[in-house]
Image (tube, rainbow, N blue to C red):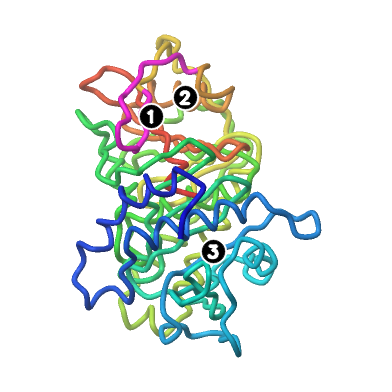
Amino acid sequence: MLTGYPAARIVAEAVVYHFVEHPPELAAARPAVTDLESLIDLAFWASLLREELNTPRVSLAFMPPSEGTALLFAGSIPLTAPALTKLAPAVERPGLHLGVWRDDTASGYCIWGVSRTVPPLSLVIEVVAPGLIVVKHSRIDAAKYANLAVLEGNRIRILDHDAPMAPNCPADLLALLRFDLTQTGDSGGILVDLAASMRQHGRGGSLLLVPARNQTWRESIVLPVAYSVSPPFAKIASLMGMNEQQREARDWARSLDRTIQTIAGLTMVDGATLISENYDVLAFGAKITRRDGQPQVQQLLVTEPVIGNRPVIMHPGEIGGTRHMSAAQFVQDQPDAIALVASQDGRFTVFAWSGCDGMVQAHRVESMLL
């Protein structure tokens, strides 16, 4: 299949190694460069079409029909951009995928059904918006996905999951924010799930993670806080403290997800939500103020986990508005804290203090949360 979207080939050649490097028994289907290129191309052109004035949002899972556990079509449907646009409403809800596989049609691929489960290390291509395509793969536990590339028209971002935040001198709490997890329920993934939920609600918000060992963060908050929580809401810590038998006896994963959604919802209230490193909710609707005796934040080291990205020093006002300015000020005044900021336009920034650089680092991670 010849593609008309040049970025498809570039991305296919760049990310194919993520699939071929794994042992064969771990992957249901290893895509070749031609598979990646063709499916990205089809997804891109489908994203530009309309069905009854609606923009398609659809997820394609590259796997043979034998791996599906949901709905099989009586006959396979040739995979074309118009076909994807027509079927998109059926799989618009989160967790549903159109199963696609190779065949001898004109496009070389067919749609065989709908599946909710995806085998480990399978290729998934998601149409997020017109011209916006995300290439990812399922993880070994099949519960989380690793974004590999984001294509937005002629802009290509190949993600670097090994790119550290504050690489020279990271804040201790950054260890809790890990995008490379392979196990569901790992405590290091809680902040990632919170970040994804904050971004998903689309209202914007700030989440401040402060150490439990001291209360100096109060010096950077206008007191009294509009909505203090007493005692701290410790549901996540309670769930994470359960042993395997307790988790199996209760609907643990669903309860954890509901709790994360609840906390992320608090960030929609004007002001910042404060949680401890144990994920206990301390307050929300908090107003950030400059700590007495501290200077106004003047510069940030801006980074992004994209291959080829180079850190750039910028003024806080260049990356966002009041929410970003206040978060950067909070981290400068409270260097043992980190701040997560979601913008209404989908951008997501993690602020952390880099002691070796002597400034706040703003790490742009929205590409990993799409």
Q: Residues within 10 Å of mark 3 (few under 14, many from 20)?
A: many
Identify the magenta region: 302-316
As drawn, the residue found furthest toward the right would be 52
Front-most of 28 and 330? 28
Q: Which residue is mark 1?
A: 216
Residue 171 sits in quarter: top left
Name the element at disc 2.
Answer: helix
- Residue type, label 3: Ser
Nearer to us of marks 2 and 3 is 3
Q: Dot 3: what SS?
A: strand
332 or 113: which is nearer to us? 113
254 horizontally vs 57: left or right: left
Q: Amino acid at mark 2?
A: Ser
Point 58% across, 22% down: residue:
321
Compared to residue 156, the image places residue 291 above or below, namely above
* Amino acid of disc 1: Thr
Task: Determine crowd level at label 1: few under 14, some 14-19, many 20+ residues with C-alpha closer than 10 A.
Answer: some
Total marks drawn? 3
- Above or below residue 299? Residue 248 is below
